[in-house]
Amino acid sequence: MALLAITRDICFHIPINFRQKEFNEMNDQFNLYVDKFEEICKLEIGDKLARDISGVYYRHIHGSYFIQLRRWWTCQGRHHTFNYLDEDFTKFMVFLDKTMNYINITFDIRYRQLAKNLRDLANSLMTGLYRLKKTYLHEKELSCKIDSIIMSLIDFKNDIGEKLDSPISRKLRGNSE
């Protein structure tokens, strides 16, 4: 009888703890991306983008003194910006795909909230990236890379919007509100 009780407890608690750990990892990764991309969301036309050793972006605000000198000194030219955007957004797109996969296989409200937060982050990123593109109008390669990232974010927003607004999702929202 005791063995049955132990087995029952183990079988029921492992998937729940596994699912919780899985979600916590996803949420932690989301928070890392929010911190990493915070300055991209704040970009204005004319601002230059740079990345520090830890991988977090920062801005050289348009009109600041010695921008070219600081960017040269820290090796933060437009070719580096292209490489940083390519590297980081390739990883970010993998994260977005992983989130979409979870949304497709589960109706867990926590993943749906994470998806909504990602949609908001995508909106902010698109605004900042569009402004960055306007800063580099004559840099065809960088401009195309930014367009590619923006299009991928739009695709994600459309896909996640369809999933979150599906009839099943509306029923879930109706039951939880």
Image (cartoon, helix red, strand yellow):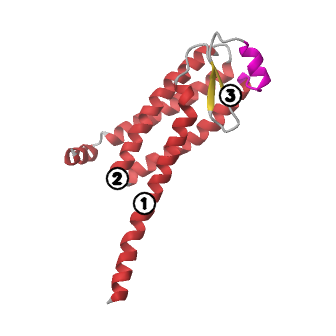
| Residue for badge 2 | 108
Measured from the top left, where is residue 34 in percent x and y?
Answer: 51, 36
Q: Amino acid at mark 2?
A: Asp
Q: Residue furthest front?
A: 65
For the residues labelled 1 and 2, say whether their Cβ atoms are less than 8 Å apart: yes
Measured from the top left, where is residue 68 in percent x and y?
Answer: 74, 15
- Does label 2 or label 3 sit earlier along the sequence? 3
- Closer to the camera in the image, 6 or 147: 6
Quadrant that contains the C terminus: top left
Mark 2 and mark 3: Cα distance apart in space:
37 Å
Say whether residue 76 is magenta: yes
| Residue for badge 1 | 19
Circle number at residue 82: 3
Q: Amino acid at mark 3?
A: Phe
What SS does tag 3 mark?
Answer: helix
The image quarter containing residue 43 is top right
User: Is 100 placed left or right of 146 in the picture?
Assistant: left
Numbered range of the magenta stretch = 66-78
Mark 3 and mark 1: Cα distance apart in space:
36 Å
